[in-house]
Amino acid sequence: MQVVFDSTRVGFTNALIELAEKRDDIVFVSTDSLKVVKGEPFLERWPERVVELGIAEQNGVGVCAGLASTGLVPYICTYAGFLTMRACEQMRTFVGYPKLKVRFVGANGGLFGGNREGVSHQFIEDIGILRTIPGFTVLCPADGDQVRQAMLASVDIDGPVYIRIGSGREEKVFPSGTPFPLGKIRIMADQGDDVALFAHGFVLNRVMRAAAVLEGMGIGVTVVEVATVKPLDTEGIKAVLARTGCAVVIEDHTVIGGLGSAIAELIAEEVPASLVRLGLQDCYGESGFPDELLDAYGMSVEDIVKGAESAVRKKNKV
């Protein structure tokens, strides 16, 4: 099978250029990250709309807050952890609390995004951190064109938006031009009601491969993309869980605080179901090739199949 790549970093820059061509309020704030996120084409066309601050993420978020308070829409794009950990207080207090329209784009999300730099640049906590901050919209597009579509769809959302991107070596998942389902789940496969597989981002292709294996085993699978992690499409997820009664969540993130936790909370409060969470099990990553890392940390096709079988067994015991 030939793998087609669709860089999420290029998708970010293409969308930013497209937005800037139509709107005068779009600004790019760089914290020595312009080249990292392939932003040179934007700089060449609008040097007056680029604010370069050097390696100063906390200052960068503060500058974004100031720009947003004047009516501009600043996009700050750098490594995900440098935003959500190093500048977390600034994101919370100076952007989240006053509900300013700042757009944060976090690169190297997950193990998949940080294979070259290792654990210091593998950001597996970003979604969990931002789920706790009131008012944030958290988006996890699957490939480069979906990043573009997500940026176009979310540009006018009130309050802060976080968009998770990768290293630039992501597989293509959806045909180009597929709209981003802002705020809604997307059913990627409906092969039966035995078990639901929930996922987002760069694991989706392997989830679809696992679904094909399960179908061959006679296990009916519904595959659900949850690209908007916050606010969660609770009604859509509840409807799926009510049909299947069990689920597996697969995410390139720690299992603590991310999508798996969000769905576990929904199950506990709204719709009882058995649940298996696949992701980093309260541990750090290591250096390696992206697919090998996902396999090593429990997110292989085989792991997803076994997780689905486990969820179904749990359901049948109730």
Image (spheres, rainbow, N blue to C red):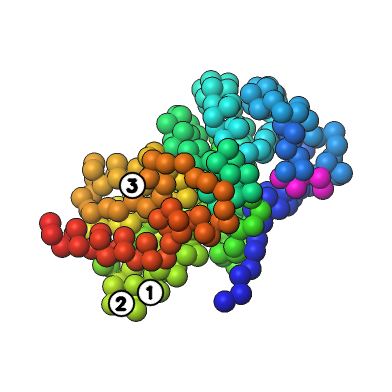
Q: Looking at the image, do the residues carrying marks 1 and 2 touch, with CB atoms under 8 Å apart?
A: yes
Residue at figure coordinates x 66%, y 38% from the top left: 78
Residue at figure coordinates x 25%, y 61% from the top left: 310
In the rendered structure, which amino acid carries the disc numbered 2? Met
Which residue bears the numbered disc 1? 213
Q: Is residue 79 above or below residue 148?
A: above
- Magenta residues (range): 37-41
User: Which numbered disc covers residue 217?
Assistant: 2
User: Of discs 2 and 3, which sits in the foreground?
Assistant: 2
Residue 288 visible? The answer is: yes
Which residue bears the numbered disc 3? 263
Q: Is residue 24 above or below residue 234?
A: above
Q: Is residue 146 above or below residue 137?
A: below
Return the residue nearer the eye: 287 or 185. 287
Task: Say what secondary structure mark 1 lies in.
Answer: helix
Return the residue nearer the eye: 5 or 157. 5
Q: Position of residue 108 (x, y in %)?
A: 60, 45
Q: Position of residue 204 (x, y in %)?
A: 48, 61
Residue at figure coordinates x 82%, y 48% from the top left: 41
Cα distance in 3D space between marks 2 and 3: 26 Å
Q: Position of residue 12 (x, y in %)?
A: 68, 49
Q: Is residue 64 left or right of residue 109?
A: right
Say whether disc 2 or disc 3 marks the residue closer to the N-terminus. Answer: 2
User: Of discs 3 and 1, which sits in the foreground?
Assistant: 1
Is 92 covered by the magenta stretch? no
